[in-house]
Amino acid sequence: MSIQLTAFRWVPPFAQGFVRDLRVRWALEEAGLPYQVTLIDPEVQASEGYRRWQPFGQVPAYRDDTVEMFESGAIVLHIAAKYEALAPRDEAGRARMTTWVIAALNSIEPQVQNLVHLDVFHAGEAWTKERRPQAEVALNQRLAALGAWLGDKDYLEDRFTAGDLIMTTVLRELVDSGVLSRFPNLDALRRRCEARPAFSRAMEAQMQPFREHAPAS
Ligand SMILES: N[C@@H](CCC(=O)N[C@@H](CS)C(=O)NCC(=O)O)C(=O)O
């Protein structure tokens, strides 16, 4: 199968290692699927041709022999539907995997992003002093519920699935804020998943172009 993926040629250091093509690269590495990457820049993002592939001009966009897609979660689900490395083969097991992918993106990520946006994009702005405590309370409630579900299990279900993969990409955004360290079992899940060789290969593949295309200082 021939697989193509888009990623950024370069992003500022704070975003390096967090661009969402990482999710797709990681899923492809887990499944053992080779892929080709098209590196894009703001000019390509704005182009009509790229918008026909990714309507919002974002990364990642994906195509293989049969489908053309965008949205990292949808792409990972597409891959996971076919490869046992990412989901059990039985319908009930696949449904649980899908459930956790959507939970990560729809129930956890919005709360995470609320906090990360304040800390990264609005750092030091006066209004955030009032908003941040509310955002942190809402996030803590979600993380406490997730932590209660996980308990002392190694993964969200009885084995690693694409649900753990997507959840890890969401949780790791909280490391710098110190929030995740208050939920030791979630932090352990994140570390356990990041220790997978496929994660390291995906991370290195995202980082390499950033080193090559770093602006001259
Ligand atoms: N929901 C989308 C979000 C994609 C996204 O936010 N991509 C970012 C990089 S992590 C991007 O392309 N940002 C540039 C922009 O929005 O113009 C997905 O998961 O694929």
Image (cartoon, grey):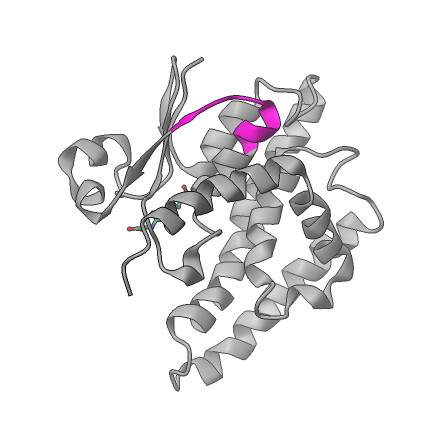
Q: Residue at x 51, y 43 (%)?
A: 204
Does the stretch in magenta take in 207?
A: no
Query: Residue 41: x percent and y percent?
Result: 24, 45
Query: Residue 94: x percent and y percent?
Result: 65, 25
Q: Which quadrant of the view contains residue 3? A: top left
Does 88 appear above or below 196?
Answer: above
Quadrant of the snapshot with the N terminus? top left
Q: Residue at x 67, y 19 (%)?
A: 91
Q: Residue furthest right?
A: 152
Does the stretch in magenta take in 30?
A: yes
**Which residue occupies the foreground of this view, 156 or 10?**
10
**Which residue occupies the foreground of this view, 43 or 122?**
43
Query: Residue 87: x percent and y percent?
Result: 66, 26
Q: Which range of residues does the magenta coloring cover?
A: 27-36
- In the shown orientation, is residue 66 left or right of residue 94? left
**Which residue occupies the foreground of this view, 175 or 159?**
175
Q: Which quadrant of the view contains residue 54? A: top left
